[in-house]
Amino acid sequence: MIAFPIQSLMDEQACYDYLLSVLHPQGLHCPQGHPLLADQGAHDRHRLPLVDYRCKTCGAVFNLFTNTLWSKTRYSCATIVLILRGVAQGVPTAHLARELGLDRAHLLEHRHEMQKLIEQHFPPQPAEGYDDRSR
């Protein structure tokens, strides 16, 4: 089971920083792969700490969630961290939706997308000592 340090993640900036490290371990970049320059200012700051940037190379506007399953979401960073925590801990979707005040059907769609991504990136491994040649 994955343990999430709740106290330090409920701060929006801390949640943003956590999601940045998880979603973009090599750093934030535009959809075309151009890196975000260290001295580059934000293009739009209306949802701090989530800001939009305009790529200085190609002009594309992007943010933390561009090209992820959270693209175009209106959830706060803290809400997304709590969703990830709930899914990782196996909290039922209906309970998680009630707890966070979210639409259950919409949350279930996100849960299925997360599960597909997990299966793609972390395929199930045969149990130790299991010999699949006997099939």
Image (cartoon, helix red, strand yellow):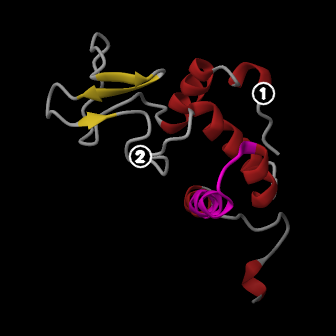
Q: Is residue 105 left or right of residue 57?
A: right
> What amino acid is labelled 2 in the image?
Lys
Q: Quadrant of the N terminus?
A: top right
Which label sits on residue 6?
1
Residue at x-position 24% and y-position 32%: 34
Residue at x-position 47% and y-position 45%: 73
Element on which disc 1 rests: helix
Report x, y in % for residue 128: 83, 63
Task: Give the residues drawn in magenta, as a range.
Answer: 100-115
Foreground label between 1 and 2: 2
Which residue was labeled with disc 2?
Answer: 72
Report x, y in % for residue 74: 49, 41
Residue at x-position 82% and y-position 66%: 127
Q: Is residue 74 left or right of residue 132?
A: left
Which sits in the foreground, 93 or 31? 93
Element on which disc 2 rests: loop
Q: Is residue 130 left or right of residue 20?
A: right
Q: Is residue 122 left or right of residue 98?
A: left
User: In the image as oriented, which residue stretches furthest toward the top?
Assistant: 39
Give yes or no for contact between labels 1 and 2 (Cβ–Cβ under 8 Å): no
Report x, y in % for residue 69: 48, 51
Which sits in the foreground, 83 or 125? 83
> What amino acid is labelled 1 in the image?
Ile
| Residue 83, image quadrant | top right
Tell me how far mark 1 sits from mark 2, CA to CA.
25 Å
Other-residue count near label 2 (Cα within 10 Å), few / some / many at <14 / 14–19 / ≥20: few
| Residue 134, image quadrant | bottom right
| Residue 21, image quadrant | top right
Report x, y in % for residue 31: 28, 42
